[in-house]
Amino acid sequence: QAQLVESGGGLVQAGGSLRLSCAASGRTISSYAMGWFRQAPGKEREFVASISGGGGRTYYADSVKGRFTISKDGAKNTVYLEMNSLKPEDTAVYYCASGARRNSGSSIAEYDYWGQGTQVTVSS
């Protein structure tokens, strides 16, 4: 049974930066894809970014491409999401997820473990 714990959320002004962390236990992240999703109030959960088990492949939603960077530290079994040039529309609860396979894409159905989420609020 894997457990994922996110941290690093908070309140930031537009144009600012935040780094989210996701500490995993019960599953070695180097063997599975990891992803970040977000859900804004009244909206469906959407894909943000993912990284393959080996770390060699990353994927981003068009809305964050060029601003967000996903990475992982195998020694710490932790995944990160570096968020720069934040916009008010990035405001959401951000969730870390572990894919069921070494490579997973943007579909929620491809992820079998989820964290509890961390709030990111970007003020204008």
Image: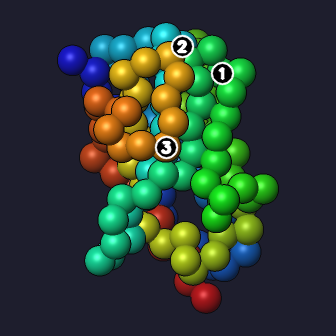
The amino acid type found where label 3 is placed reads Ser
Name the amino acid, label 1: Gly
Image-based side of 45 in relation to 123, left or right:
left
Q: Residues within 10 Å of mark 3 (few under 14, many from 20)?
A: some
The residue located at (28%, 21%) in the rendering is 2
Residue hosting label 3: 106
Residue indicated by mark 2: 30
Residue 29 can be seen in this image: no
Q: Position of residue 70 (x, y in %)?
A: 64, 40
Q: Closer to the camera: disc 3 or disc 2?
A: 3
Q: Which disc is residue 105 wearing?
A: none
> Mark 3 to mark 1: distance in Å?
16 Å
Real-space CA distance between mark 2 and mark 1, rounded to the nearest whole angstrom: 7 Å
**Residue 27, percent across and down?**
36, 14
**Residue closer to the observer: 15 or 108:** 108
Residue at the farthest left position: 1
- The part of the image, by quadrant, that contains residue 114 is top left
Seen at 43% across and 57% down, the residue is 46
Which residue: 63% across, 76% down?
87
In the rendered view, how is the structure colored? rainbow
Q: Residue 17, how many percent across, how many down?
A: 68, 62
Along the line of sight, the residue nearer the viewer: 119 or 36: 36
Q: Do residues under tags 2 and 1 come within 8 Å of each other at their CB atoms?
A: yes
Position of the C terminus, as image quadrant, is: bottom right
Instruction: Tell me how far mark 3 sits from mark 2, CA to CA.
Output: 18 Å
Mark identifier at residue 55: 1
Give the crowd class for mark 1: few <14, some 14-19, many >=20 residues within 10 Å: many
Q: Earlier in the sequence, mark 2 or mark 1?
A: 2
Q: Amino acid at mark 2?
A: Ser
* Badge nearest the viewer, 3 or 1: 3
Q: How many marks?
A: 3
